[in-house]
Image: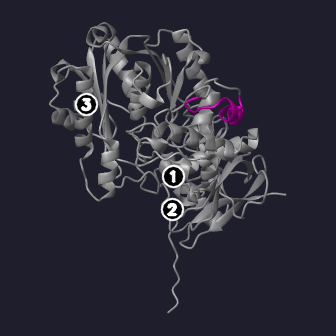
Amino acid sequence: MRSLKRVAAVVGVGHTDWVRDWNRVRAGERPDDCYGYAAGALRNALADAGIDRSRIDGLIVGPTTAYERMAEVLGLNVRWGDQADAVLSVVQACMAIESGQADIVALVYGNDQRSVGTQYGGPQAMGGDLFLSYVYHAPWGLTSQGALYALMFKRFCELYGVTERDLGHVAVAQREGSSRNPNAIQRKPITIDDYMAAPYIVEPLRLFDYCLINDGGVALIIAEAGIARKLSAKPVFIEAVGRYDLNQGATSLEPRLTDFYRPAQQAVAEQIFGASGLDPSDIDVLQVYDSFSVHIPLALEGYGYCGIGESGRFMREAGIGLAGKLPTNTSGGHLSESYMQGWNHQIECVLQVRGECGDRQIENARRVHYTSDVAGKAVSIIYGA
Amino acid sequence: MAMTQTAATPPRVLALYDGPFWDYLKNEGRLRLQCCRACGTWRYPPGPACPACLSPEADWKPVSGEGELLTWARFHKQYLPAYPAPYTVIAVRLDEGPTMISNLVDDPPEGKLVGRRVRLNVTNMDDGVALPRFELVG
């Protein structure tokens, strides 16, 4: 399987000042709307890439904005365009480049979810028109994604003996990363005892298992491999992509609540490691979409970083912090850096490979695996130097 | 002045195929699901075709109301007027095959619950909705 191996590379990344946006929104201001945040991020990504906007011939916008209006705001006439979430944006940019429909693609995302009070739970939960499971179980009082992950983790605990205290290592490790990240919103280090002392929201999950909700924007510039080498001293290549969806029984959450979506992750692992000739021991840094901390132990097991049922011990003993065996969500992720719905993780992947992560840089980080298992699909990307 | 507050059951999805599910619960106090007339596969939520064989023909047949508890979670925060915390959401694998999200009617006892047998318990909500819930057996 070719799996888009080194077809394209990231040549620029940019984001808004999440900390400033957070402080202003909490002070009652509305610094920008989705389009404004996206435009700010794109300006920074173009500067990082060192290219003029006129070089862009493809555009992907995030799911929170309308494609045509975004392109109009950014003044971009392009020969190819699409709308997608973070991980699929990268995949689709590579597909467009591979098929010759674009050479340099801008990926832009802006979200004003905090300042406009976007609802991710409740009977009017965002996305309910796309995912029946988001609204179907409201009569029984299940309307939040957090509760879904609580259900997953409870079964996981009872089947494998993983504990709530084990799960606390996720929040603690990610706060270690964010404490060394000037762009992170929550930077105060926490201990396992702090984690355990925080209140349950939906048991077995506590406050620190939940992601932030904040405003901001992210942009990436992805270029065809040959062009990328000319444009950038440090292009970060997409080594492999993989995807598998489990749709049977999806509304009743069956693929998640029986086997934790693991069969999909295992199928994706075969695709990405097979295509790249790598295996989990070749991965220096792991980045996981973490709307909830529970994603991390499930990804560790699903992708073969540890055995089934062993993620509790792995996090406790081998470690997922900056000095651990597998540093994970080194920026702080959604829990502590910024909830940019997977987009900020792409930046961290690129910066780790470029060696530009400052105090949280993992030494000789050459390959970073990003994975996401939300919204009814498992998708992964391996980034490499 | 005494006030009684009865919060409405959070909204049900009532699309084209959903009606009989709720009507049978209310009128018979029984849980019926669509069963494929061609291959006998049970399905939930209600829908236009059998996911096993794509046949459109189905009968609304009563299920045993028994199953196995897949997992559970205890809400400590109130999200909905009809659901003051704490309450318990569960996932049940019915003996007929489909998985249902529901509630455990009693407070969960100490100890592990995954794999425990459960039985249907239809609750009549204040606003007249008959809601299929479950209780632990044995």
Q: Earlier in the sequence, mark 1 or mark 3?
A: 3
Marks 1 and 3, how far apart in space?
A: 34 Å
User: Which segment is the magenta one?
Assistant: A308-323
- Find disc 1 in the rendering and name its residue: A144
Taking the image as shown, residue A70 lies to the left or right of residue A10, namely left
Q: Position of residue A346 (x, y in %)?
A: 41, 28
Secondary element under disc 1, as helix, strand or loop, is loop
Q: Position of residue B84 (x, y in %)?
A: 57, 68
Task: Judge whether residue A285 is colored magenta.
Answer: no
Q: Position of residue B83 (x, y in %)?
A: 56, 66
- Find disc 3 in the rendering and name its residue: A44
Q: Residue at x 65, y 44 (%)?
A: A153
Q: How many marks?
A: 3
Q: Chain of mark 2?
A: B
Q: Residues within 10 Å of mark 3 (few under 14, many from 20)?
A: some
Q: Residue at x 37, y 48 (%)?
A: A214
Front in this rendered view, residue A282 or B129: A282
Asked if marks 2 and 1 fall on the same chain, the answer is no
Q: Amino acid at mark 1?
A: Ser
Quarter holding the C terminus of chain A? top left
Q: Amino acid at mark 2?
A: Tyr
Q: Residue A278: name its quadrant.
A: top right
Task: Judge whether residue A316 is colored magenta.
Answer: yes
Q: Residue at x 68, y 33 (%)?
A: A311
- Find disc 2 in the rendering and name its residue: B79
For residue A273, above or below residue A179:
above
For residue A59, above or below residue B114:
above
Q: Residue furthest bottom?
A: B1
